[in-house]
Image (spheres, rainbow, N blue to C red):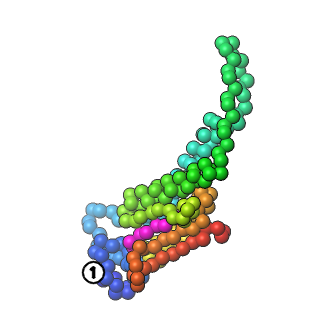
Amino acid sequence: MHCSNCGASVNPTAKFCVGCGRPIAVTLVPGVPKKKTHPLVMIMAGLFIVFFALVLFGMLINAIVGNQPASTAQTTIAPQASPSPTPKLTKAQQRAEDIAVRKAYAKVIDKQLIELGIESETYTTGADATTMVIKDALAGRVRANSIEKADTMFQQMRVLGFKKLEYENGFEGDMYFGWHWDLTKP
């Protein structure tokens, strides 16, 4: 099968051309509705939910172990012991925790992409896991442009301490396509 736009050879099950990034025409089967939601919209919604859950989890943890005002209720049974202060994390412990959060975030993204039918591999690189790499066999300009417009995802990644995002097709040589974003710049 060949792309009608650029003539590149494409997999019969492909949704996008690896040569030009254009969608491949699909013959619709009667009675089966065509999906209208773009996969990256679903990814963005999932990322927002994950980010929101992390914020709520942080607030819950802060409420449990953070500085809470003492209760004004009087107890007649026995006085309550004051909570012991929460030990602060050392720099090494905080670094290890930050790395673990970034790696977990990459796993969530990988799982969401696979659930959307996008065969990909998502992982972190670097000593502090500050670079996220998404290898997508069908990486192309269309998906890269959609990622580039995902401001919310970039903001979430900055909050988590990521410094770079690399999106590539994972091929070597002339077939390689890749996009890189520096998250340290607004």
Please indicate whether residue 78 sits to the left or right of residue 18 in the image. Answer: right
Quarter of the image where the C terminus is located: bottom right
Residue at x 66%, y 12% (from the top left corner): 77
Instruction: Please count the marks in the image.
Output: 1
Residue at x 54%, y 64% (from the top left corner): 126
Which segment did they paint magenta?
132-138
Quarter assignment of residue 26: bottom left
Q: Amino acid at mark 1?
A: Met
Quarter of the image where the N terminus is located: bottom left
Q: Is residue 109 visible?
A: yes
Q: Give yes or no for residue 136 being in the magenta stretch.
A: yes
Judge whether 174 appears above or below 102 on screen.
below
Q: Position of residue 148 (x, y in %)?
A: 55, 71
Please indicate whether residue 19 sits to the left or right of residue 144 in the image. Answer: left
| Circle 1 SS class | loop
User: To which residue does mark 1 refer?
Assistant: 1
Residue at x 49%, y 58% (from the top left corner): 106
Q: Is residue 43 visible?
A: no
Judge whether 72 appears above or below 18 on screen.
above
Judge whether 80 appears above or below 57 on screen.
above
**What's the magenta bit mostly, secondary-structure-wise?**
strand
Q: Position of residue 150 (x, y in %)?
A: 55, 66
Quarter assignment of residue 157: bottom right
